[in-house]
Image (cartoon, grey):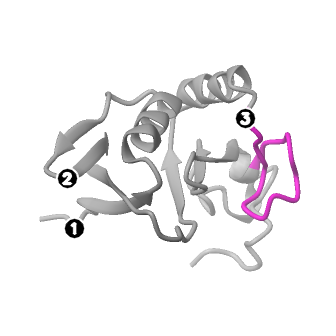
Amino acid sequence: MTITLNHTIVVARNKIESAAFLAEMLGLSPPERLGHFVIVRAGPTSLDYVETDGPIEQRHFAFLVSELEFDAIMARINMRNLAYWADPFRTRPGAINTYDDGRGVYFDDPSGHLIEAITRPYGSGGLDAKNPNPLLTAPLS
């Protein structure tokens, strides 16, 4: 059996709002209730949203998407006038990255979590890519 990530818990200020936001932005099926969780399914993995009144530590969730899905996500970002960045440190606002000859974008969800959409896994282009990932410093082995 292949090991896969089954689910992760996402702490949110408003679990319904945050789950609906993610599902809409990524073009996924609407959220479902499961006990006290509101869940969003992304392939074999579910993101299980739960509410808190306490502090929320920002998390980073990266999703591998097709080129068409990326275009649709960017259209939704622009339709909502959301801020977005080419990098997780927010040093390149209003831009996307083209690492590994794919495309990537970062944006915040309503609870402050960083959502990332990429069309190629980072490192997949290696050093031979037209636009290699700057984190790569040596050939993959």
Residue type marked 2: His
Q: Which residues are magenta?
A: 82-98
Mark closest to the chain's N terminus, 2 or 1: 1
Instruction: Point out the tag, 3 or 1, that comes first from the N-terminus.
Output: 1
Task: Confirm whether the magenta stretch covers residue 94.
Answer: yes
Residue type pointed to by label 3: Leu
Residue depicted at x 63% and y 63%: 123
Position of the C terminus by quadrant: bottom right
Q: Are marks 2 and 1 in contact (CB under 8 Å)?
A: no
Reply above or below: 12 against 73.
below
Mark 3 vs 2, N-terminal side: 2
Residue, x 39% and y 59% (percent of image)? 10
Where is residue 120? Give x, y as percent: 58, 48
Which residue is painted at 38% across and 47% down in the image?
15
Q: Are marks 3 and 2 in contact (CB under 8 Å)?
A: no
Task: Say few, some or many: other residues with alpha carbon within 10 Å of mark 2 (under 14 / 14 to 19 / 20 or more).
Answer: few
Q: Is residue 67 visible?
A: yes
* Residue 133 rendering spot, x and y as whole percentages: 75, 62
Q: Which residue is mark 1?
A: 3
Residue 16 occupies which quadrant of the picture?
top left
Given the image, on which type of amino acid does mark 1 rest? Ile
- Residue shown at the point (49%, 48%) measured from the top left: 63
According to the picture, the residue beneath numbered tag 3 turns out to be: 82
State yes or no: residue 93 in magenta. yes
